[in-house]
Amino acid sequence: MPASLECLPFYGGEFHAPASGEWHVVDDPADGSRVGRCALANAADIDRAVGHALRAKSSWAAIHADERAAVLHRAADRVEARIDEIAELLTREQGKPLCDSRKEIGFGVQVIRYYAEEGRRKFGSLRPSSLPNVKNVVSYFPVGVVGAIVPWNYPVDLYCWKVAPALAAGCPIVVKPPHETPFAIAAVLECFVEAGVPSGVLANLPGTGVDAGAALARHPDVACISATASVAAGQDIMRNAAGNLKRLSLELGGHSPFIVLPDADIEAAAKAAMRRSFSNMGQICITVNRILTHPEAHSPFVDALVAETETIELGPGLDPGRLYGPVTTASVIERSQLHIEDAVSKGARIVTGGGRAASGELGKGLFFQPTLVDDAPLDSLPMTEETYGPVAAIRSCGSLDELLAVSNSLSFGLAAYVYSEDLELAWALADRLEFGAVGINVSDTSELQAPFGGWKLSGFGRELGPEGLDAFLEPKHVKMRVNPLG
């Protein structure tokens, strides 16, 4: 693998120099060493890519679903064959351990294969009519040119969540990958091109949200935007997309409560809370932000969670067997520290962690101690805003009603978790939690065949499952009078 990499805009079946002439340097968050540089696309690049996609739209839509499926399967085969190489790229640019990078790319392969087949299973239907001589046919057509905005925390995974269903639906797609982590996606792009995606059907234009992302969202020839982003970015996308009333699928920020009831398996709950709080260093939209315990469970749970957290050993993601690495950007460290300081100033207690991990070799990278703050006030930053870093806040609540009220009190609604051995009670709570997904005795709410997305400010629209394909299809009703026999 070359010591220094380069990522260029790709559209019309070719790589191009950036119109802006601007570049972003990508460093390894584990030690600050240079990984490479990424061109920054701007509105001019976006316009050219959308032009190519528009010209390819009709021909790609006209290809039979079986042929599109064959292209997707070939792409999945190529990604799978290169999984170790792509995983190393992902770890070098993003920081996550190799085992997590391989897992991410492996799930991306599953997503590509799933939508290859799901695209073949999208049937029309004959609907009933109130008149005997009228037939109603409902069928589905590609929405048109799709714009996709992919974040840096799970770049390969979320790239596949958008590209695979869009291509399966018959839509050309222009992707703005994250300029912070562009190289693993660029390798996956190569796999799609080698698999036979026609010129113009798939574009890759890394850039900033302010320039490339905004240009994509406001482009009049883009019919749909699928974005995973912050709430503020999602609001900007909506404003920019209003010009031609684009269809939007937005998965935005979260602030997940983790509820521990008195009869929970404390050891299992602590292991789950630790992993979901600190996997990928908390840089996950469904990470555990608020841990809300019943008073009877509070002390034993906190003791168990602290013990689990203190087993974490940080280090470079390329180290063999490493499970926890650096954060990806310096801003994550700054925000984590700010949230901890705010909670402590309002009466919270740091029970483990609390600052940057800077001893020895860790001092070269962006390492931050996994941190737990107990007795966090409801108005403290980690209890009200998404930290998006390795910090979890804990608070005891006096009753089931208070647990539910605190859980639903924020304007976020992506994921929530409930740990209890009383499944009827847990299910009853899940029904009243205002979130797009609830995990009962599980710490991951994503599932390939189930819809993923949020309520309230966490967005709208769904990815994964059949709903992920529907995001890129327009229904059409044809009402037809037929002549009766006789």
Image (spheres, helix red, strand yellow):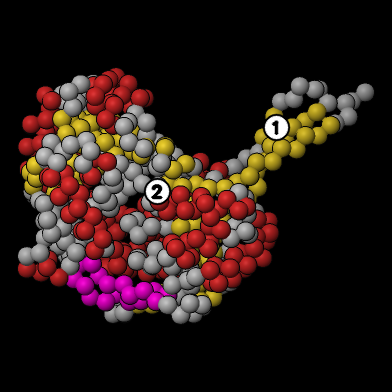
Identify the image quadrant of the N terminus: bottom left
Residue nearer the viewer, 61 or 246 = 246
Task: Give the number of the mark in front: 2 or 1.
Answer: 2
In the image, taking residue 424 as reference, residue 468 lies left or right, namely right
Label 2 secondary element: helix
Label ID, residue 197: none
For the point 44% across and 50% down, which residue is it?
234
User: Which three-letter amino acid code belongs to the residue tagged 2?
Assistant: Val
Label ID, residue 126: 1
Res. 164 in view: no
Image quadrant in which you'd find residue 108: bottom left
Residue, disc 2 = 231
Label 2 crowd bin: few (<14), some (14–19), many (20+), radius 10 Å: some
Identify the image quadrant of the C terminus: top right
Query: Over which residues does the magenta segment extend?
Result: 23-39
Circles 2, 1 touching at the beta carbon (< 8 Å): no
For the point 33% across and 75% down, which residue is it?
25
User: Which three-letter amino acid code belongs to the residue tagged 1?
Assistant: Leu
Main SS of residues in magenta: strand
Image quadrant in which you'd find residue 48: bottom right
Q: Position of residue 190 (x, y in %)?
A: 46, 69
